[in-house]
Image (tube, rainbow, N blue to C red):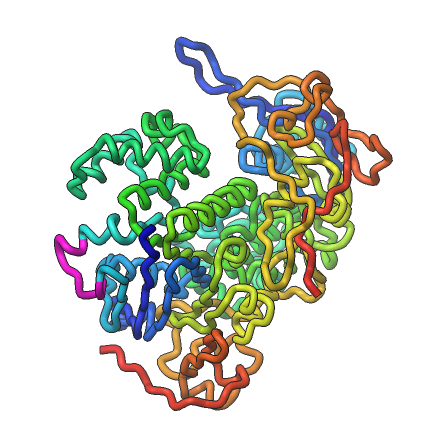
Amino acid sequence: METAPGVRIRDLTVVYNTPMGELPAVSGVDLTLTPGTITGVVGESGSGKSTLALSLLNAVQPPGRISGGSVEIDGLGDVVRLRGEELRQARGRKVGYVFQAAQNSLNPLKTIGKQLLDLGRSHDVADPRALVRDAKDLLARMGLDGARVLDSHQHELSGGMRQRVGIMLALVLNAKVVVLDEPTTALDMITQATILRIIREVHEERALTTLVITHDVGAVAEVADALAVMYGGRIVEHGPIADVLGAPAHPYTQGLIRAIPRLSGDISQARALPGRPPTLGTLPAAGCVFRERCALRMEICETVEPAPVTCGGRTVACHAAGHSLAPVKRKEYV
Amino acid sequence: MITGTAVTKTFRQRGNVLGRREVPALRGVDFTIGKGGAVSFIGESGCGKTTLGRIIAGLETYDSGEIVIDGTPMSGLSHRRRQPYFRRIQLIHQDPYSALNPTRTIHQTLEAPLRLRARQAGRPRSWGDVRAEELLALVGLDPGYVLPRYPHQLSGGMRQRVVIARALTMDPEMLVADEAVSMIDVSLRLGVLALLKDLRERLGVSVLFITHDIATARYIGDGGELYVIYRGQVVERGATETIINEPVHPYTQSLLSATPVLHGLERPGPERVVPTEALDEGKADAGCLFARRCPFSTSRCEAETPVLGHDGGTGQLHACFHPRRRSVVPLETA
């Protein structure tokens, strides 16, 4: 079987053009997706997680643009440098993308089968019959009646079924890197559990490298091997999921985990994080982006942005996280 | 105090040649919400929990049954006569982004209902401004910051607090919060839940909390009661902590089992229950409505209809022929 490709994001910066000038939604992000693993990226609204996901397809829409860095995918090269036809072929064939609210990304006027054939045509699939067969197999694998689904319009399918159609469309061209943007948002608990199980099983069977973007730590905790926590366009903590959840090192991760409504645990220990998530306009230009809401704030946090430091498989970007201070390069956004 | 007895509601879709389609949303629901109490309705989408909430808030009619508010049956009253009762019950919508008029400042949003209240009570107009500041302070916002701003300038959590402040302008006895935190960033959810708890404790406002996420129901304060609703019927009802920790109905157990496990902090409950098939409202029903999806159903379940009771000596009410406690919720790891 083909081995899963690795993905290496290096110093990626994505800026949005606003009336206040170009502001970074993602700044200087380094993230490595180990081949064959599921990496979860959690962040609140405005953390840059969806922008990061779109960068894997080099699909950031104006007024946004990738202003620096690289996204290396094995067998494909640097996605940021791909243009035109090369890029179009990479999307779908190499990198599958399940869009946020898959229910809204389907064409309401065409049956799922027609949309599948459109996909085949735009990627010059030689044998449409084989494509339909693969699609039916995938749908059956996910517990659906393939023939019935392909004959349906999107309004005839439930939310969970549409989400599975989204996953089928992302995988049917045999993409080995899959990005899922909020795959369980707006789904019920039981449907969510089913979709998460399917994601995990399909990931293993097809030897994929998977990235799951979500605001819901719970959803990702169930499936991911590694967890990256985003805040204000930076990855503030990254490591094996049980380590990050069991012993969070960054004050934001700690606060976030304490703030999750849970079925177990002492409810008197739970509390919301003070303050509000930053937006593009309110991000501080220098220093740590989390300091406004941080209980461990120190003088150095005002002026110096903490650099990510890796130790024992865990990467943390915090002055207070108990590692020695490394020299930090100030990033310029040109 | 508000009580409901055998409340039913059926939605009728306009017919075609094949006849009308009838969708039973509520199949005879009893409920009691005491003064200062906290009641949570839990269930999948389409179970009827939102319809019931809207009926209780006076925004939806019901087909049969009776609703009694403070000793007065509503069925005998004209629409006009009911209004003063239902004004004391205010609905908080799921989506704070669409619940506020984007072209009005928060001051303008709060001013209109307060002017009405001032006129009713024969107070001067300036009372409204003072009251607006009081209410914003009560919901934990800085009036000086919030009043001149437009909704888009506030975070999701702040917007939901404004919506709650607006509901409080009517001096309600009860707040109906329909998925009130599901669209708010995770780090801020507990803040809004703590506010609802606080309003109960300080003002004696009762809270009807409608959600698909059972964990959030733990956070609206002591003495809460949980109703698990499945396809328009209450299948289990009792103290919140009892239902979460000692559920006896397999449907409640499936919902709780579907809650994601935070690996590293928690381990899965040993007896997790997974429904044998997906929800399909189209199929005919006889006996227990959950029997077809239930891993423990017997021939009796398909022939007879269970009614809500204490069979088997359980503390909570349940509608199951084979009640059995199962350990399904995630357990905290030491």
**Predominant SS along the magenta part:** helix
User: Is B294 within the magenta?
Assistant: no
Q: Residue furthest left?
A: A84
Residue lying at 53% horizontally and 84% vertically, measured from the top left: A320
- Splitting the image into 4 quarters, where does residue A33 fall? bottom left
Residue lying at 43% horizontally and 58% vertically, measured from the top left: A38
Is the residue A150 above or below the residue B149 in the image?
above
User: Is A83 within the magenta?
Assistant: yes
Is the residue A235 above or below the residue B182 in the image?
below
Query: A12 or A62: nearer the eye?
Result: A12
Is the residue A22 above or below the residue B239 in the image?
below
Numbered circles on residues, count: 0
**Is residue B37 among what the camera can see?**
no
**Is residue A188 among what the camera can see?**
yes
Query: A108 or A320: nearer the eye?
Result: A320
Is the residue A136 above or below the residue A174 in the image?
above
**Residue B242: % across, % down:** 77, 46
**Residue A3: % across, % down:** 33, 56
Q: Which quarter shows the C terminus of chain B? A: bottom right
Q: Which quarter shows the N terminus of chain B? A: top right
Asked if residue A102 lies left or right of residue B93, the reply is: left
Q: Which residues are magenta?
A: A77-87
Q: Residue furthest front?
A: A1
Q: Residue furthest right?
A: B313
Asked if residue A53 lies left or right of residue A259, the reply is: left
